[in-house]
Image (spheres, grey):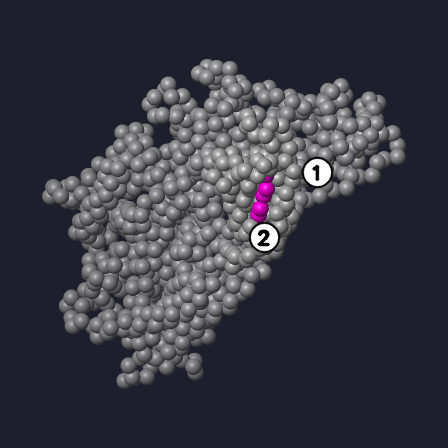
Amino acid sequence: MSPSTTDPSLESLALEPLVGLGRRFLLLVAGLLVVVAIGVVAYAVQLVEGLQVTGMAPTVNKVMWGIYIINFVFFIGISHAGTLISAILRVSQAEWRRPITRMAEFITVVALSVGALMPIFDLGRPDRIPNLFVYGRWNSPILWDFFSITTYLFGSLIYLYLPLIPDLALCRDRLSARVSRPKRWLFHALAVGWQGTPGQRAALARALTLMMVLIIPIAVSVHTVVSWIFAMTLRIGWNSTVFGIYFVAGAIFSGTATLIIVMAILRRVFRLRPHIPDRQFVNLGYLLAALSLVMLYFNLSEYVTAGYKLEEGEAAHLGSILVGAFAPWYWFYVLGGLVLPALLMLAPWTRTFWGVLAGAVLADVAMWVERYIIVISTLRTPQMPYTDLAAYLPTWVELAITAGAFALFALLIACFAKLVPIVSIWEVREHEEEAGAQPRPEAREAVPRGLGPAVGLGIVVGAALLAALLPGAASAGGRHERPGAGAAAEGSAPPRMSAPAGPGDSTRLAVLIAGAARLGEPLRITATLTTAAGRPVPGAVIRFLMPGAWGEIEGDVELGAVKTDSAGLARLAASARRSGMVEIRARFEGDGRLGPASAAAAVTVATGGQLYRPKMPAVSVRASGLAPWLLGAALAAVWSLYIVVARLVLAIARAADLPAPAAAGVTDVGRRRFFRGLVPAGMHAAIAPVGLGLVGVIARSPYTHDNLEGHRPGRGYRRTPYAHVGKRAPMPPLPPVLEREVSFSREVLPVLLANAGPHVVPPKSSPPPRGIRLDGYDRIMAREGLVVPGKPERSELVRVLVDPAMRMPPSIPPLPGEQVQVIVSWVAQGAKNN
Amino acid sequence: MANVSRDNGEAGRAPAAIPRRAFLRHTAAAATALGLAGTLARTERAAATDGTPTGPRLRQWVMVIDLRRCDGCAGLALPPQCTQFCNWSRFVPEQQQWLEVYEKEIVEDLPDSGVNYLPAPCMQCQNAPCVNVCPVGATFHTPEGVVLIDQERCIGCRFCMAACPYDRRFFNWGEPVQPPQVKAAPYNVQTQTPAIKGTVMKCDFCTERAAAGGLPYCVEGCPRGAFYMGDLEEDIATDGQKVVQLSRLLRDNEAFRYKEELGTRPRVYYINGHGEEAPRATSHEETFRKADLEWPWVEIVRVAEARRETSA
């Protein structure tokens, strides 16, 4: 690169910190590491003890998400700083962004990394994280988070790295003599042989254009899906359709505030005041104020509409926020965090660096408080009829981990600032040169060339849509299963008559069953009541009964009670829900004058298929069909474009054929080529498997789940034995009776005392289950049917040990076979008190 | 390098908008994904026919709770026995009430209208929010319509707990206390034993009992007979004493489902009432003794451990 004609002090100011480690820096790192270490210790405590060490546990499962999730949303939120400043302002070609883009991009990458850790701290079983990849369900909002945050993290890393290349080349050229060897190698590797040739500039411009257009929708998607963690539930306060855009606005707002704060600190530390004038802060302050007004509008929209209608539960929630337990927090957030920053920018005497900084600090703190309100106030709004229980108070573990996370954030930014220039030197120079010279041809052409990737993307997505619609349309037609109704068949069973009985004027009842004898078809039952003389009896109540059973509970199921009409006919239609021989009984109880009568008719119902199938909704964004393929196609398209960018970086590396300056520090040509190739190779090696992996999770998803639709069990789904109509698991055979004499006191009683829970240690407040006590011979024998001496198969005590239908409370746990055999033998041998 | 990209270095020729190879590659990648998609769509349909059990008809469990008979066991001066039986039988970890009885005033702001009691098991929703949001499919529907949890797959993110509109899911914040023979037993997804730290648990309709022709513990243990266990497929239900036709029971008593407007399509029906059929000594002086519920093995295990520690 030719020596610049611009102010050398920018270069020296930006490059100087990269040489050597000052004492202040080491002290800072040490201090931050201590805080991080405390956080690590706290997490270790949580891993050992479980989440009971958090403040969520005492709330009796009501507040099940706390500070970890709040931090997660907060950090992912502030990660939108980079996108706004870097990408949106770059796309709109706002030149004032140039000195601050790098800091913004730092913040994005670091905030994403720290934020992505937070849900891991919240997991009850972090050792099972691989389940997310192996069994991940594409239609869970947590998986959407996983996809979009990973995609955004990779995208931001690329987007941070690309504009760094020329500056790293500058470091390589200017600083190689003054830094340690590993750092020299680092510069060489990261600079990928940048020499500023026209070809390299063109490739870089293309890559930047591609990324800046791509990263905006990715960033929007990230906080939208984070908001859908809440908005896809039915909870009051979360069940809102506006959450997506509300969270994105809040993210950009808090991101801008964070950027202002970080910028202020770094400008002070690195003495960059001449290059980042107060004007920059005022511009960002305007942005902050505009966004705070947007946030105020969202708050208004949300709470005015909810507060007007006051749906069930909304009144309690709104009350808690506006005037109740959360009121101080909420009003601090609105007045201190939204109104005040706007006012600070409104009044000219506060429209200064300090005014903007104060507004930013307030805004950032207020946004954390806002996330706290969103999460906790909803969780403390009762969903069932109870009054609000324990409040949520974070414990030292949660606070230590939070402090460690913030310390990690600061630590990573500090380390970045020591590694690479924090101001984008070449972009500032480029702007300064442009301001004085003709606009550069490459810069102009970069814009139309940006359409190229967009066209390619459009073709791919269009093809994906087309191909996905075809299987989706085909499956939509075939997926609705029709119930097993066939054409109504004719058929009737011959009526059977039975003789009436009873005193008084005797009556006769006849029953006829017409209708299909097929499962699910209605059986049309007609009963005719006549007197013995043959006259019809009107107005008599006939009860229709059918034998039914549930396990061992048998009885007559009443199908209906119908009054006879003038012709003495009573009609009932009942669908046949049992196959085999079905007997319908009709019964007339008799009144004062007429005697009772009964009759029965039988019909054989043919077996059939399942009658009850839960109907699935016709349209669901969760169902498989179109949606997963769209998602997969979108991911595949984005990650393919990352590969395109990686190829462009490779092109930059390959184009470096000119001999490097002698002072570069790595003289051997082969070694130079090796270093140049490292980063492009690394990019391909990182992007391809991760991209394929994400698409793979979606593709694999239907196979490991049963819960997409229609109860289709997948492969990884843990099967339980099916429960079939008409089938009952037979009682397993009793173990053989032991030869020897079994002693009650020495063998049977200890087993009962050890296992029978409330039957032997009566609870304080309730009687033992069904009043049965097992802690003494007399008590056991006093209970009829509990033990039938000599007949273990009829003894309830044996049956509850063996019969799965009767496993008695308190669920005497499945006793080992030997112990069951002992008890069976004791009963078989006469249940003696020996 | 010999195979330097053609895009650079050739002076005078405008480079392609996107490097040709890159375009082909990214279309190929997308096409592979779609090809996979095509295979999957076909295989999914194949699985549909051999995945769903055909032939023997499957039970479709449903529960009906008759609120005319439920008085929260307040008239018996006992803690709700349905919850107590469930706690005993499933070794439910401390403070969890998989079946929970709520007390609510019948008419808002009219204290003389009294209270009624709402026993709330897991509603086993057909459009279950918990099943919809689980990231790893640890909670799932069985073909019989019951929602179970595979505690060996659960990652403890508690999203299902946030999603449940009935508050019917519970988390093991620490190591759950259970008798040693339960802890030592192999994990069974149908009975959720042993309880695993850092995972979610809930009422599971006691399917291992129901499938064998028995009844859930709450149905069996209710001293008022307020619970019916039913099957939508055979259209039958029982309260432990007699067998009735389910559709008739629901129709004749105008049964409803709780929070039905949320679209969860629960499998638990309620028959409206205020405990009027529960024989009570007095009507206003009973107390609802939910606070007296016990998790007795907790005490037993703690005493045993303390004894072991002092003797060791």
Asked if the stretch drawn in magenta spans residue A510, the answer is yes
Q: How far separated are the C-alphas under marks 1 and 2?
A: 40 Å
| Left or right side of A301 for A623 | right
Q: Nearer the viewer, residue A277 or B289?
A: B289
Q: Please state if A247 lies on the left or on the right of A397 as rendered.
A: left
Can you tell which quarter of the image residue A64 is in? Answer: top left
Q: Is A52 located above or below residue B139 in the figure?
A: above
- Pick the quarter of the image with the N terminus of chain A: bottom left
- The image position of residue A226, as x and y in percent, is 37, 49
- Magenta stretch encompasses residue A163: no
Q: Which residues are magenta?
A: A509-513
Q: To which chain does the residue with label 1 belong? A: A
| Circle 2 crowding by C-alpha within 10 Å: few under 14, some 14–19, many from 20 | some
Name the chief secondary structure element in magenta: strand
Q: Is residue B140 above or below residue A41?
A: below
Q: In the displayed structure, would residue A392 be above or below residue A547?
A: above
Q: Residue at x 38, y 75 (%)?
A: B23
- Residue located beneath label 2 in the image: A492
Residue located beneath label 1 in the image: A803
Please tell me which residue is depicted at 83% across the width and 27% down the height of the picture: A830
Q: Toward the viewer: A43 or A240?
A: A240
User: Do the dots labelled 1 and 2 sit on one chain?
Assistant: yes
* Residue furthest to the front: A533
Q: Amino acid at mark 1?
A: Asp
- Would you say residue B292 is visible in this rendering? no
Percent across and percent down for residue A409 are 38, 47
Q: Chain of mark 2?
A: A
Q: Is residue B116 visible?
A: yes
Which of the two discs, 1 and 2, labels the residue nearer the N terminus?
A: 2
